[in-house]
Amino acid sequence: MRHRLKLCYTNLWTEMHRNSKYIQYFSLGEGAYLEKIQYYESIYPELKFLYTEERIEMDIDYIFCLSEIGLYHKLLQKVDPIIELVIIENIYDVNGEDIYTQLLFKKAICLYHVGQYTSAIHILQQLKAIDHKNKLYQEVILLSFKKLHSKKILLLHIIVYASLATVFCIAVMQLFYRDTIFSQHQNLLFQLRWTLLIFSITLMVGIEVYLRIFSKYKTIKKI
């Protein structure tokens, strides 16, 4: 009888202990990202005693807190096991949101911020295959392509700026040196100015159009 009574009190204490950790965590408030992270990490060894639903809910919220604070490297270390757990437990919806795609998107954004653009694009292509109407995925893919090809884009921009600077210099020379040799070549300089100006504008627009078309083509090809 004493053994049964002791066991009963032990189970009751464990139940209260489980709930107190869960309640304490979420009582910190939605915007208390840093406080939640610190509390979660301080009780991490004890999380295994929580109910599976409570543990997963805390894990997911912890990942969201890491994202809000900008702890991208830590998030990338923690997110994969949680994504796997969400898949294993068949958890599709948390607070009205598709938690699987939310976690994948958080991971993709973190990869983007730490400079792993190819990996970010790969995940975003998967997300676009799931929800092709979500324009945000395509916009981040475009940003990633820009970062991935930043050196080439910078070189093209330098060419554009050099062309515009040349147009400006020619215009100044034509304005202030009308009685010199430049006056003999007004038509040629006029044509050169407009040619360089049109070239610069075309190249600037062309860079953006090419990147958008190329990023969409690569995405469709992967899908």
Image (cartoon, rainbow, N blue to C red):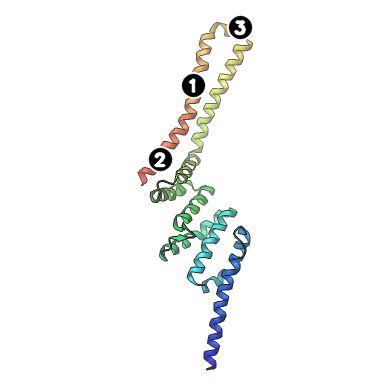
Residue, far front: 96
Q: CA distance from mark 3 to mark 1?
A: 27 Å
Q: Residue at x 59, y 12 (%)?
A: 174
Q: Would you say the residues marked 3 and 1 are in contact, meaning their CB atoms lie under 8 Å apart?
A: no
User: Which residue type does callout 2 highlight?
Assistant: Lys
The residue positioned 52% from the left and 72% from the top of the image is 50
Separation (CA) of disc 1 from disc 2: 27 Å
Give the class, few, some or many, for how many residues have Cα within 10 Å of label 1's Cα (few <14, many ≥20): some
Please say whether residue 219 is visible from this viewpoint.
Answer: yes
Instruction: Identify the mark at residue 55; answer none if there is no mark.
Output: none
Residue at mark 2: 216
Residue 100 at x, y percent in the picture: 44, 57
Between the C-alphas of marks 2 and 3, the distance is: 52 Å
- Asked if residue 43 shows in the view, the reply is no
The answer to which of marks 1 and 2 sits earlier in the sequence is 1
Q: Residue furthest bottom?
A: 1
Give the quarter of the image for residue 62: bottom right
- Asked if 141 appears above or below 192 in the picture, the reply is below
Of the residues under marks 2 and 3, which one precedes in the sequence?
3
- Given residues 209 and 171, the one toward you in this image is 209
Q: Amino acid at mark 1?
A: Ile
Residue 165 position in % (x across, y down): 57, 22
Q: Nearer the viewer, mark 3 or mark 1?
A: 1
Q: Are marks 2 and 3 in contact (CB under 8 Å)?
A: no
Q: Secondary structure at mark 2?
A: helix
Q: Nearer the viewer, residue 196 or 58?
A: 58
Q: Earlier in the sequence, mark 3 or mark 1?
A: 3
Circle 1 residue: 198
Q: Amino acid at mark 3?
A: Thr
Estimate the x, y position of residue 184 in percent, counting from the top left. 55, 5
